[in-house]
Image (cartoon, rainbow, N blue to C red):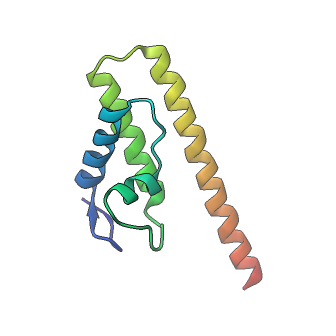
Amino acid sequence: MLVCSCNYITEKEIRDTITEFLDEDCWQLIVPVKVYHAMEKRGRCCGCFPNVVDIIVSTTQAYHAARQTDGDKVVDFMERLKRFQEEQKSEIIERRNRVNRSA
């Protein structure tokens, strides 16, 4: 499935990049910019970033489930990711509101 039409990036490419990061350090915080940088791409319109965050979360959950990681550690990590995702969504909404008010 095509996730980013600006850069023609598929969901599989994103999942593969995330898995590479998790293989290096399974507890690192992975954000869309880090994924795009690793693929030597850059966010253009950044409209796909919320979907990329969802892919990061689901890939990370599947990664830890497949490796039977200690549940307490996974829950804490996933909560951090969810908080980050909510913060990003709030910032996007706030930016949109500012643009609409100034227009």
Q: Residue at x 48, y 39 (%)?
A: 29
Q: Is residue 5 above or below residue 52?
A: below
- Give residue 64's position: percent from left, percent from top: 34, 25
Q: Residue at x 25, y 54 (%)?
A: 13
Quarter of the image that includes the C terminus: bottom right
Residue furthest right in the image: 101
Q: Residue at x 54, y 38 (%)?
A: 82
Q: Residue at x 69, y 77 (%)?
A: 99
Quarter of the image that includes the N terminus: bottom left
- Give residue 62's position: percent from left, percent from top: 31, 31
Residue furthest bottom in the image: 103
Q: Is residue 62 above or below residue 70?
A: below
- Give residue 30's position: percent from left, percent from top: 45, 43
Between 28 and 62, which is closer to the camera in this rendering? 28
> Viewed as shown, does residue 13 lie left or right of 85?
left
Asked where in the image residue 84 lies, by quadrant, the reply is top right
> Viewed as shown, does residue 76 lie left or right of 64?
right
